[in-house]
Image (cartoon, rainbow, N blue to C red):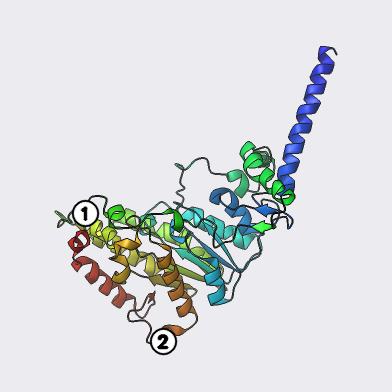
Amino acid sequence: MNSKKWFTAILIMTIATLALAAGLVFFVDPFFHYRAPNPKLFYRLYDQRSQNDGITRNFDYDAIITGTSMAENFKASQFEDGLGVKVIKVPYSGATYKEINDNLIAAFKSGHNPKYVLRPLDYSLLLRDKDEMRDDMGDYPYWLTDDIVYNDVNYLLNKDVILRYAIPAVLSYFQGKNPGYTSFDEYSYTDGDNKYGKDYVLVGKKEFKEPESTELWFLTSEEEEMLEGNIEQNVVSLARKHPETTFLYFFPPYSMVYWGGLYEEGMLDKILEYKRKAIELMLECDNIHIYSFTTHTDITADLSRYRDQAHYDYEVNAFVMDTIINYENGYENTDMFEVSDRITRENVVEYLTTESLLLNNFDYNSLTK
């Protein structure tokens, strides 16, 4: 065989191999980029940034659980049973408000009309640029989330996609595995992998000191502009466009160690002012229901429930969801709630005053004993 024929043969084989690989990924579609799951295969869900966009666009549902790692340990089945909806859970660990909101925009653009969106609002992400994305977690898969066809080559000819996702899905068929996908109770669920307790939360801290100086509580013009931009673009604007959807936003019950650290740094009142301003903006929309759980010191001061200053165990997730379900079902008018966990126009001043008094007067050193 002369060199020309040899080159032609190699070229044909290369093209055929690439076409076969691309065809396999297209057929299996493990990131659900083109369609819903193949009903004959089993799909393992475990890559949030790569799989969530396809789940959001192509799965069948009428409610969404999303957010940062604060949403990972929710059980979708609890939400479904409590409110009679079909749920997807699409958390983005460590994500900014923009990344989460972009995915919610994709849900509506893809023709879905969710009845509920359940989402935590992390305190640490309130004062961020409205367009900030995490660029320290590896390359973001824009080739999955945009509408540019030609860059799908990054998906169709991706070695990891072929070896870690497409081939295992095909093998599941020949192994007789029940078709389907990882349940949304199990997807991104980390509770069984975590260790909880005072040692993991305090990390050797023995004492909380009085602040040497206190940051002025009011917002500078720059802070106000940044916070308003972030909340308006990534929290409120979608609710304005979709009044038919109820957005269940909640401030997670971070541990008292988190608040003690802010108190010691003289930043407590400043963070509370960020929260107050965010709530003020959200209360403009009747279809945004705001929840906060700071006053539950039976949880936040019990460090056996936490793996660090912010992340709590599954039982706290279950409590948060159960409380929200009860409110949404109209049980807030009963005597089951000693302190209102839902913040409304009528009780916002009372709630924030109670919260501020609690956090500014709490004995944080009791946590170290």
Disc 2 vs disc 1: Cβ atoms closer than 8 Å?
Answer: no
Residue occupying the point 27% across, 50% down: 203
The spot of residue 334 in percent (x, y) is 40, 87
Q: Quadrant of residue 88?
A: bottom right
Query: Which quarter of the figure is the C terminus placed in?
Result: bottom left
Q: Which residue is mark 1?
A: 265
The spot of residue 58 in percent (x, y) is 67, 58
Q: Quadrant of residue 35?
A: bottom right
Residue 1 lies left or right of residue 356; in this view the side is right
Is residue 59 among the parts visible in the rendering? yes
SS label for mark 1: helix
The amino acid sitting under disc 2 is Asn
Q: Earlier in the sequence, mark 2 or mark 1?
A: 1
Look at the picture and state if 213 lies above or below 297: above
SS label for mark 2: helix
Q: Residue furthest top?
A: 2
The spot of residue 11 in percent (x, y) is 78, 24
Is residue 240 or residue 254 the one in the foreground? 254
Q: Which residue is mark 2?
A: 333
Residue 363 lies left or right of residue 119; in this view the side is left
